[in-house]
Image: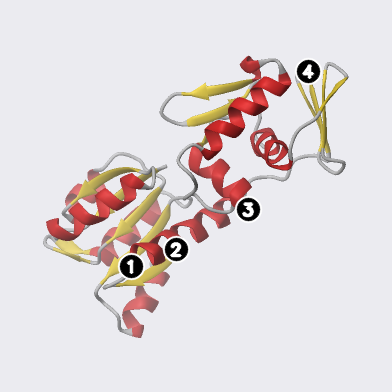
Amino acid sequence: MRILLVEDDHRVSAVMISMLQRRGYEVEHAATATAALEAAPCDLVLLDLNLPDGDGVDVCRALRARNEQIGIIAVTARGEERDKITGLRVGADDYVVKPFSMAELQARIEALLRRSVRQVPAVREIAQIGPLRIDHAARTVHLDDAPITLTRKEFDVLASLARQPGVALSRERILLDVWQTTWSGKHTLEVHIASLRAKLGRPDLVETVRGVGYRLRT
């Protein structure tokens, strides 16, 4: 997942960038309101409201007007109730007051991602995707009518991919969907993907999308 960090304090931004990258996020840094509005598209914005060339509230309003789906978390020293209300009203999804811990920020990011995951349309109870037939109620999988025995987590990974067949899902989205967190063991998802491919006997069905995550072939 790509995060835009809008923060003018370079000491704070350096620490946040390091911590976010260690958690597997791709981070772009903008130190001004102008740079924030000119940045490339992203999935989530961590937005300081005190910026040297403008008010972060105006940046928030502009980003929200541009993209209804983008996640925005205000990360600021403005702790007054009226500031929080203003930030939320102009489009922020959440509001974190400095100083904060990275554990708290991570929890806020994950909560926002969970809301995003719930917006994905539910899969049909029985889905036929190419040679795969997935019965979500019975939690069974057949490939060319032959039953495939999967562990609980292997099935959950496959089910996550089956929600949007043919669409590349980020590693973070699958982790959040299956493990309810984006902060897991270093190779947790990769190990389960490898095992899933081996049991299916068709490694090509679960494709690696370089720089993004994985996709279930249709």
Q: Amino acid at mark 1?
A: Ser
Disc with the residue nearer the chain's start (2 vs 1): 1
Q: Could you tell me which secondary element the residue under label 3 belongs to?
A: helix
Whether 196 is drawn above or below 177: the answer is above
User: Label 4 vs label 2: CA separation?
Assistant: 39 Å
Q: What is the x, y in percent for residue 100?
A: 31, 70
Tell me where residue 206 sits by quadrant: top right
Nearer to us in this view, 189 or 9: 189
Q: How is the image coloured?
A: secondary structure
Residue corresponding to mark 2: 108
Structural crowding at the residue carrying mark 2, measured as other residues with C-alpha within 10 Å and reported as few (<14), some (14–19) or many (≥20): some
Whether 168 is drawn above or below 48: the answer is above
Residue contact at pointers 2 and 3, CB within 8 angstroms = no
Number of the front mark, 1 or 4: 1
User: Label 2 vs label 1: CA separation?
Assistant: 11 Å
Residue corresponding to mark 3: 118
Tell me where residue 155 sits by quadrant: top right
| Horizontal side, residue 114 vs residue 8: left or right | right
Q: What is the x, y in percent for residue 96?
A: 35, 70
Residue corresponding to mark 4: 131
* Picture residue at 64% right of the left edge, 21% below the top: 217
The answer to whether residue 189 shows anywhere in this view is yes
